[in-house]
């Protein structure tokens, strides 16, 4: 079994169009949730979101290439470029065949899908753009990443709603760990802020009216986000051989299925995934310094997640620092786990646990330490990052400081 | 019973797949096996039927639904508060 380390990362999110800008805001606890500007909101009741505002695709892509790229693929490519450059890795020759590209996304090219439906059903057009299908397919981001970087090993997309990114990165970790590949470009990408999608989310009645306040009394639900975060996972041996900069070690992956409800989370399922990640990483509960929560800000998740953490960590739970990055960058669905892992990786590097923003009052049912509002300077030697998706699909990543 | 209340009971019976006779004001949601997603569907059906907007948030920690009557009362209040804004 190989040890797996992270040698590069790239981010594009509401908090910033690159990892540095993203971390600047997130580590300070500054929220990037605001009025939605990228789509018309006059027919919507929910008008807040965490958009990648001010994104100019033409600054990143040639006109010809743009025609083939849905917004989610654009995000995936931008983040992958940063990650690959950051790692200094080369995919020339055999290296390309020994590398994987596994990118999570919940729904893929939603903007393209939405626009095409509008054209056919509302505008009654008789044809849609020839590239409609290659743009909307969920694997588009992965495919474009392999094409741009010359990755010729295993490549596919992973879909498990809000857990897509953690599941994708988990697969990448397992592949590098087993020696099937030496390197994996992995993470998640999502761009679903369209009128149709917002209507869908509104109908579920779980969207926040003011902002995202995970674990706080008075929280009113989720805020949709978008973006992508991509990492380069490498076997420790290969990373050392080429003198790569190492961020941290990917120590473990835990997965489980609730087998209960199509939307409501389950304490048992969440606890099994958390415990599974710890076991896989050979971590005792006492070893974990920080938890990046799924923390969507819904009544259901935050209570369930609190109970699950108590179940796994027992007495240690009350002194365990936990925070939700969704409080600042919203819920990026298939991109969430990756964006949140970026916050953990950078937090471990800089010795700062980002806070849970917008926290106003203690909820008696959520009575743990959620690092409210102010970031905390602390050494993070081991951390976990949780994702608990609709349909009861749970995925947890465990990281250890590399030594 | 008003015709509006009767319509709501009809919708509840349909969405929860229970006999109409079982849907009475003090019937407990748990007994009728009505879950949170059923409540969301019931509200959707009510909005469609009456062409109104019911501003219901499933995260609202003040809303407590134990009985069918609780659901009807909450909807009536929400409509009153917001004047039953038509779509």
Image: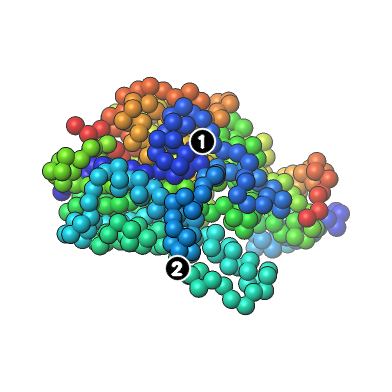
Q: Position of residue A227 (x, y in %)?
A: 47, 47
Rate crowding at label 2 as few (under 14), some (14 to 19) or many (20 or more) other CA atoms within 10 Å: some
Left/right placement of residue A402 relative to residue B74 reads: left
Q: In this figure, which residue is indicated by the disc labeled 1?
A: A328
The answer as to whether the residues below labels 2 and 1 share one chain is yes
Residue A245 sits in quarter: top left
- Secondary structure type for disc 1: helix
Name the residue beneath numbered marker 2.
A134
Q: Which picture quadrant has residue A32?
A: top right
Question: Would residue A80 appear left or right of A363 to someone viewing this image?
Answer: left
Q: Chain of mark 2?
A: A
Q: Residue at x 35, y 50 (%)?
A: A80
**Image height check: is A363 above or below A172?**
above
- Secondary-structure class at tag 2: helix
x and y percent of residue A304 in the render? Answer: 48, 40
Task: Tell which residue pokes out farthest to the right in this image.
Answer: B2
Query: Looking at this view, is A284 or A170 the one in front?
Result: A170
Residue A107 is labelled as none
| Position above or below: A319 against A230 | above
Residue A70 in picture, x, y percent from top left: 49, 59
């Amino acid at each position: 079994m190989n040890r797996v380390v992270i040698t590069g990362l790239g981010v594009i999110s509401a908090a910033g169009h690159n990892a540095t800008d993203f971390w600047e805001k997130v580590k300070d606890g500054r929220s990037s949730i605001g009025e939605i500007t990228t789509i018309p909101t006059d027919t919507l009741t929910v008008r807040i979101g965490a958009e990648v505002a001010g994104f100019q695709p033409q600054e990143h892509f040639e006109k010809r290439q743009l025609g083939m790229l849905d917004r989610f693929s654009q995000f995936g490519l931008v983040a992958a470029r940063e990650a690959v450059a950051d790692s200094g890795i080369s995919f020339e020759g055999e290296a390309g065949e020994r590398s994987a590209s596994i990118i999570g996304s919940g729904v893929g090219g939603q903007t393209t899908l939405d626009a095409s439906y509008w054209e056919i059903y509302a505008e009654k057009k008789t044809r849609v753009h020839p590239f409609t299908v290659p743009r909307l397919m969920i694997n588009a981001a992965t495919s474009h990443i392999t094409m741009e970087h010359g990755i010729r090993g295993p490549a596919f997309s992973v879909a498990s709603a809000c857990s897509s990114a953690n599941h994708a990165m988990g697969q990448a970790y397992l592949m590098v760990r087993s020696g099937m590949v030496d390197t994996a470009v992995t993470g998640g990408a999502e761009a679903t802020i369209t009128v149709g999608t917002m209507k869908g989310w509104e109908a579920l009645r779980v969207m926040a009216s003011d902002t995202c306040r995970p674990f706080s009394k008075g929280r009113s639900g989720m805020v949709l986000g978008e973006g992508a975060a991509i990492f380069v996972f490498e076997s420790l041996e290969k990373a050392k051989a080429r003198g790569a900069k190492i961020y941290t070690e990917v120590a473990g992956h835990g997965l489980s299925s609730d087998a209960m409800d199509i939307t409501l989370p389950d304490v048992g399922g969440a606890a099994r995934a958390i415990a599974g990640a710890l076991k896989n990483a050979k971590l005792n509960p006492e070893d974990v310094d920080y938890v990046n929560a799924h923390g969507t800000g819904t009544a259901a998740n935050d209570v369930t997640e609190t109970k699950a953490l108590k179940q796994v960590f027992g007495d240690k739970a009350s002194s365990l620092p936990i925070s939700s990055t969704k409080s600042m960058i919203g819920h990026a669905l298939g991109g969430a786990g990756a964006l949140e892992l970026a916050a953990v990786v950078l937090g471990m590097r800089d010795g700062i646990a980002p806070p849970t923003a917008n926290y106003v009052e203690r909820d008696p049912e959520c009575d743990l330490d959620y690092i409210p509002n102010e970031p905390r300077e602390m050494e993070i030697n081991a951390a976990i990052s949780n994702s608990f998706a609709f349909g009861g699909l749970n995925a947890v990543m465990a990281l250890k400081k590399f030594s | 019973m008003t015709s509006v209340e009767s319509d709501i009971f009809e919708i509840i019976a349909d969405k929860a797949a229970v006999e109409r006779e079982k849907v009475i004001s003090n019937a407990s949601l748990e007994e009728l096996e009505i879950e949170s997603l059923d409540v969301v569907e019931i509200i959707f059906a009510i909005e469609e039927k009456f062409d109104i907007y019911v501003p219901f948030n499933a995260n609202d920690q003040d809303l407590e639904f134990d009985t069918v009557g609780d659901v009807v009362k909450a909807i009536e209040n929400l409509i009153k508060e917001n004047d039953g804004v038509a779509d």
